[in-house]
Amino acid sequence: MSNESTQWQKNFYVGGVHLLAQQKGSRLINTVRNDGKVVGERVFFDRLGAIEAQEKNVRFGDTPLAPDNHSRRCGILREFNWAKLTDHAETLKSGMDPTKMYQAAASHAMGRRMDSLIIDAANGTAYTGKNGTTAVQLPASQKIAVGAAGLTIAKLIEAREKLDMAEIDPDAERFCVVTAKQISNLLNTTEVKSEDYNEVKGLVQGKVETFMGFKFIRTERLTSDASGNRLILCYAKPALGLLIGRGPVHEQSVRGDKSNAVQIYVEMTMGAARIEDEGLVQIACSEA
């Protein structure tokens, strides 16, 4: 082909911007306690433990007062933001306005950050005491060891048993947060003709949401331990709390300090807390 003919060729670009693969927003927001907008740097969840009834064995005796069994958990609000610049020249040259796509990307990012806060609160340090300054780690009794295996039916049975033995409200929704690998574990460790296999197969295909008493939620954002074992979470909804102080707030403004570029800006104030240790079970799963 001659140089002369190539001078008449031109490039063509399809409209819009393709968002690459990513988790779009939060998947865990509806799996935890959410009291709506809260105010303050620290947010407290006051708790009341079980108090046993006392036998009345003296006629006209003094009325016995039940002992105090109050405690509290604390969550800390943190601030997050997301910003991107665009300008008129960029829009003119590309023939498209990326504003809406940037806003969508920002919303997705905030949702993912929310899920990470919930996951970190589940696995990490909780804070108790009057001022919320006493650190509490997730007890070993709430952890199921890896056992050189991925997710198995036996591990799910044990997780359910731990919640039941702790008398976690049977009417509270229960969730199991996993990655795609753990769903594959279940498919590979159950017999093809078994009822369990059919349930898991339905779970993968979206025909079944609940298995072993847990509603399954998939996210690839679950963290791993020092040995590389993925830490999946089984919990009742009241066991974790989401704190939302503000947002998400979307703003679009002209930046005079950036040659009048248009700034897409989103910010949010949020946090999470582990409210009740007994309402959560952490399962270590090998991904080797």
Image (cartoon, grey):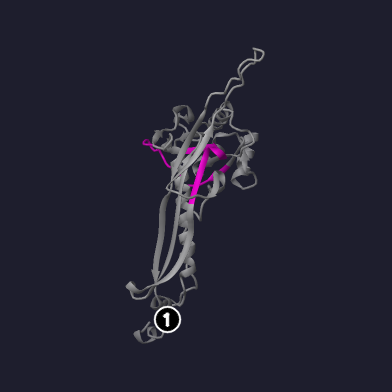
- Secondary element at tag 1: loop
- The single residue placed furthest to the right in the displayed view is 59
Q: Is 220 part of what is drawn in magenta?
A: yes
- The single residue placed furthest to the top in the displayed view is 58
* Closer to us: 201 or 249: 249
Image quarter of the C terminus: top left
The quadrant where residue 7 appears = bottom left
Above or below, comparing residue 162 to residue 269 in the picture: above
Image quarter of the N terminus: bottom left
Rendering coords of residue 267 (x, y %): 44, 59
Residue at 61 percent of width and 43 percent of height: 203
Q: Is residue 197 visible?
A: yes
Above or below, comparing residue 195 to residue 116 in the picture: above
Q: As shown in the figure, which amino acid type bears the numbered disc 1?
A: Lys
* Closer to us: 150 or 280: 280
The quadrant where residue 195 appears = top right
How many neighbours does mark 1 have within 10 angstroms: few (below 14), some (14-19), or many (20 or more)? few
Residue matched to label 1? 10
Q: Is residue 288 visible?
A: no
Q: How many marks?
A: 1
Residue at 49 percent of width and 70 percent of height: 16
**Segment tinted magenta in the rendering:** 216-244
Residue 209 is left or right of residue 142, and the answer is: right
Rendering coords of residue 197 (x, y %): 61, 37
* Closer to us: 252 or 1: 252
Rendering coords of residue 175 (x, y %): 57, 40
Q: Is 179 part of what is drawn in magenta?
A: no
Residue 226 is left or right of residue 212, and the answer is: left
Above or below, comparing residue 281 to residue 262 in the picture: above
Residue at 45 percent of width and 69 percent of height: 252
